Amino acid sequence: AGLREIAFGILQGQPSEGQTAMKLKADVMGSWLEGDLSKAYPEGESGEQVVNRGLQSLVAAASMGTTVIVVAHGGLIKMCALQIECSAEKGRTMTSPSVTKVLSSPVVNCCCSTVIYDHDSGRFHALAWFENLSDAAAKDDSG
């Protein structure tokens, strides 16, 4: 449950092309992408809730073994990626190069992010964000 998509509240299940929906999404997401995670969708989640839920789930998954595969929605992973990058070193902000790279990276279906969790420090370290696997040559072990 912790890796589900962002709860969009009153927008959940509604067409995203409507003027009201587009304005509300731009307002909330714009705040989040500027680093203000306190803003929430009406009857939905704030960025803080999304990130906390996602990171708690990733930490729980990391405790399941040395190599773990997690499948989640792109919006959730993008928000967690931004938090991981911002907290990777002191003074890093939404305008730092590694963070802006994450911001500008497309999140396509079937993409892969590779992160390592350091159990001693309680921190994640990213090796790669949002690699597009649909372009990769398929590995066939059938002979």
Image (tube, helix red, strand yellow):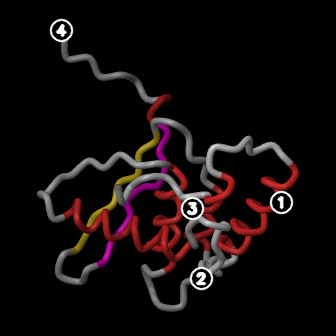
Q: Is 52 covered by the magenta stretch?
A: no
Amino acid type shown at disc 1? Lys
Q: Which residue is mark 2?
A: 93
Tag 2: Cα neighbours inside 10 Å, few (<14), some, or many (≥20)?
A: some
Q: Which residue is mark 4?
A: 143
Mark 3 in CB contact with mark 4 (< 8 angstroms): no
Tag 1: Cα neighbours inside 10 Å, few (<14), some, or many (≥20)?
A: few
Q: Judge depth for marks 4 and 2 and give the one in front.
A: 2
Q: Earlier in the sequence, mark 3 or mark 2?
A: 2
Q: Earlier in the sequence, mark 3 or mark 1?
A: 1
Q: Secondary structure at mark 1?
A: helix
Q: Judge depth for marks 4 and 1 and give the one in front.
A: 1
Using the image, determine if residue 40 lies above or below residue 16. below
Magenta region: which residues? Answer: 123-132
Instruction: Assign the N terminus to one quadrant of the image.
Output: bottom left
Q: Which mark is residue 102?
A: 3
Residue 79 in percent (x, y) is at 52, 65
Q: Secondary structure at mark 3?
A: helix
Residue 20 as seen in the image, left or right of residue 140: right
Q: Which residue is mark 1?
A: 23
Residue 62 as seen in the image, left or right of residue 34: left
Residue 138 in percent (x, y) is at 36, 22
| CA gap, disc 4 and disc 1 | 53 Å
What kind of secondary structure does the magenta stretch mostly adopt?
Answer: strand
Residue 126 as seen in the image, left or right of residue 83: left
Residue furthest out toward the right: 19
| CA gap, disc 4 and disc 2 | 49 Å
Residue furthest out toward the top: 143
Amino acid type shown at disc 4? Gly
Amino acid type shown at disc 2? Thr
